[in-house]
Amino acid sequence: MSLNDLALDVPHAAVAAAAAELRAALGGRALLPGDAGYDAARTPWNLAVAQHPFAVVLAESAQDVVDVVRAATLSGLRIAPQSTGHGAGALSDTDLAHTVLVSLRTLRGVTVDVETRTARVLGGSLWNDVLDAAAPHGLTALHGSAGDVSVVGYSLSGGLSFYARRHGLAVNAVRAVEVVTADGTLVRATADENRDLFWALRGGSGSFGVVVAIEIDLLPLADVFAGMLLWDASRASEVSHAWAKWTRSAPETATTSLRILHIPPMPELPPFLSGRSVVVIDGAIEDTDAAASALLEPLRALRPEVDTFARIPAPALVGVHMDPPEPSPSATWHSVLGELPAPAVDAFVEAAQTPGIFVQELRHLGGAVNRRPESGGAIASLDGEYLVHSIAMVPAPEGHPAATAAVRAGVAALSAWRVDALALTFIDAPGADRSVAFGSAWTKLRQLKLAYDPANLFAAARPV
């Protein structure tokens, strides 16, 4: 029997009683089906995922979270924490019929401590919130490739930034976690307080409670050399082989990705993107302008039609990868590769032509990404040298099976080079083997889950 099989059940006859219990405890903060605002509150960033929870609570404070955990427990319901819903696909194989979705999207705020170069970040805050608060002090963070991603979900699930090869996974920058546990208690976990819980949260995150705030280290960077190089996709093979060769000797100061994109005609896009298939190299190089330019010379020698690499303000790095700026419907899949020889590059380029593929991507890992710090939590490093990631858009629900098949085929094309590792932040669909993602931490995490949440109150997107 798995931990998911231990989920609390609510007999149909008790549904009305459970709803009444929530109403009594939470008043208008609890939104049930049919209530004004329920549909908007249950809709995640990934619009391809339809969530139908028993209720949604828009938590505006840590006390709101305490109240909903206690009320849900009394009502025989489960709890699913969610900030933005970027990873909602991973939650889609969890039955939410008897689950309260605790939405943290309104629990936002960042306080920067300039002397310690740290930030206290409330549970629903986005990376844009952190960058806006840190930039005036010449600081930045190990953020993702999009500014509208939740800091908590990204950081506690690993976090792979464009600074990763030099500084490692973002989870290692977490210094404290404030979490409401299964008994409705607000707990602070650090290297000195509640050490087992602190270890488990750095990887296990939403399986152990609702995180209402974290403290993270910041980087003393006001600007960075970053940008993209773009060619027509007719040159995908040439550019992909050149990038693969370039990465084998690239220093740890350089973290880049390679993508082949098939972009539909969209009037809001610039002409060099709209309706085209292109190949793009993008990322950041934490070095002087002269050193970074010299490093890029072999790639620039391929005469890209667009070259934006330059010194930019650190907050602008979230725009380099051109992630969708608005909620979008998509299906994704990924795996981690141990190497990228020429046949793997050929397979990558060929897989990009799979019908339905929107983006076929490779991210360069290695360096500090592979090194586990002594003080690390359940997730602290990621094996492998590259990550392959396929994305398909899902414009209508009936297209989801075809999109899922496309992304899985895009990743399967490189299965000969895969290693037993997965990046938690890239798991956005049901069916992934989470034991591979958690690796050697899996057994201890499951033991701690039973200790901290024996009734399996918490339903996480990437459950332990």
Image: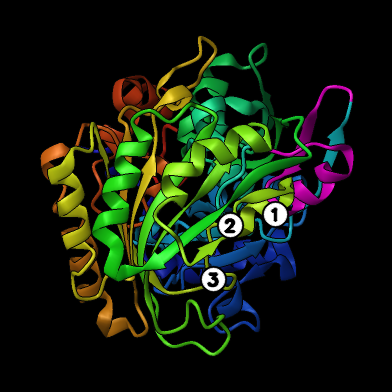
Q: CA distance from mark 1 to mark 3?
A: 30 Å
Q: What is the span of residues highlighted in magenta in the rendered image?
A: 115-141
Q: Where is the N terminus found, in terms of image quarters?
A: top left
The image quadrant that residue 12 belongs to is bottom left
Q: Residues within 10 Å of mark 1 (few under 14, many from 20)?
A: some
Residue 383 % position (x, y): 32, 27
Which secondary structure, mark 2?
loop
* Residue type, numbered disc 1: Ala
Residue drawn at (54%, 71%) of the image: 42
Q: Are dots 2 and 1 in contact, CB under 8 Å?
A: yes
The image quadrant that residue 230 belongs to is bottom left
Q: Is residue 190 above or below residue 229?
A: above
The color scheme shown is rainbow
State left or right for residue 191 relative to residue 357. right
Q: Which residue matches tag 2?
A: 320
Q: Is residue 439 magenta?
A: no
* Residue type, numbered disc 2: Val
